[in-house]
Image (cartoon, rainbow, N blue to C red):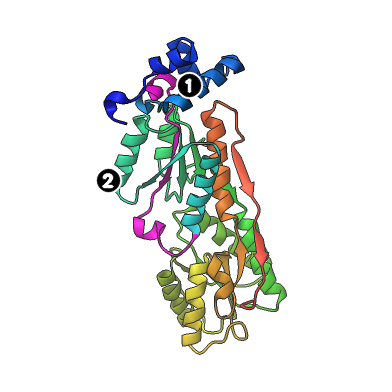
Amino acid sequence: MTGAQRPTLEAVARRAGVSRATVSRVVNGSTTVAEPIQEAVRQAVAELGYVPNLAARTLVTQRTDSIALVMPEEATRVFSDDQVFPGIIRGAAQELEAADKQLVLMLAGSPAGHERVERYTTGRHVDGVLFASLHGADPLPARLAALGIPVVCSGRPLDGADVPYVDVDQVGGVTRAVRHLIDSGRRRIATIAGPQDMVAGIERLTGYRDTVTAAGLPEMIAVGDFTRESGAAAMRQLLAAHPDLDAVFAASDLMAHAAMRTLREAGRRVPEDVAVIGFDDIETAAYTDPPLTTVRQPIVELGRQGTRLLLRLAAGEAVEPALILPTELIIRDSA
């Protein structure tokens, strides 16, 4: 069908025998129109093949039916094989598909990307914004919320911004992991911590420190950035500083994978000489050699619950300020 032949709202109104305003209300989802009239309009829409003008619909309803998922990361990190970011994206997409809404994925791994996200979201091109993988005291979530844009964070904001968030029990998960190592007889327990500009990195280190201190054990710490490369470098650093270590808690599965390989290259057996535990329970954790003991976080559910919270907020509902999801220690052969 050419543009000239495209059916109009008026044509639908004539076919249904109602006013143009009534058709507009039905097409835009109003529930104030009687069901028999709604059915007549829907039938006319189907018979004529009418497609709403989305730009005009947005002007009328002040809704775009789309949500932005903003990740302040480079594309190479988001689309790597770590399976954390893709899991959050999948959870958000599933929840939005069920709500018949569109996902807009925006990466902001540079100052220019940050500015682009701010321009786009303040231009009201989306009905709300879900932030994931925040670094530092990022002011953007609070700034958008102050402008009346619905905002939810996946992970507690570091700056204490008054923005609803969904997170996992980071400290509790690490505490269970380190206690498992202690209960297994390990006494020289090191950690490869995550980045200290992220709540996940900070809280996982807190869980480690609190648990070894309570047990009267020494702290042995190296810091990575959740990647394999940083995990290998941190493991080499720990072996040089503490050659007698007998266990390692790594704050991500990728760093744990790299730690096991580095230990093997150094002639250390896992778990006989050094036990290793990770965090995330990505798909490959069960297929490492040996299979990795890890703290499972519900990655897809993080995306789903954050999106669900945001949709409620965008609909004008009151929402809880924080939702904390449980973690679970998955014991395999590495510890």
Compare residues 217 and 3 and report the one nearer the observer.
3
Q: Is residue 55 above or below residue 106?
A: above
On the rendered structure, is 92 left or right of 9? right
Q: Is residue 156 above or below residue 254?
A: above
As drawn, the residue found furthest toward the bottom would be 267
The Cα–Cα distance between marks 2 and 1, rounded to whole angstroms, is: 47 Å
Kind of residue at badge 2:
Ala
On the rendered structure, is 17 left or right of 183? left
Residue 259 lies, in percent from the top left, at 49, 76
Q: How many marks?
A: 2
On the rendered structure, is 14 left or right of 36? left
Kind of residue at badge 1:
Ala
Q: Residue, x 60% and y 81% (percent of image)? A: 246
Badge number at residue 44: 1
Residue 296, picture quadrant: bottom right
301 inside magenta stretch: no
59 inside magenta stretch: yes
Residue 78 lies, in percent from the top left, at 40, 56
Residue 165, picture quadrant: top right
User: In terms of secondary structure, where does tag 2 sit?
Assistant: helix
Q: Residue, x 50% and y 58% (percent of image)? A: 84
What range of the chain is rendered magenta? 56-83
Q: Is residue 92 visible?
A: yes
Q: Is residue 315 above or below residue 92?
A: above
Q: Earlier in the sequence, mark 2 or mark 1?
A: 1
Quarter of the figure that contains the C terminus: bottom right
Quarter of the figure that contains the N terminus: top left
Residue, disc 2: 112
Residue 201 lies, in percent from the top left, at 50, 58
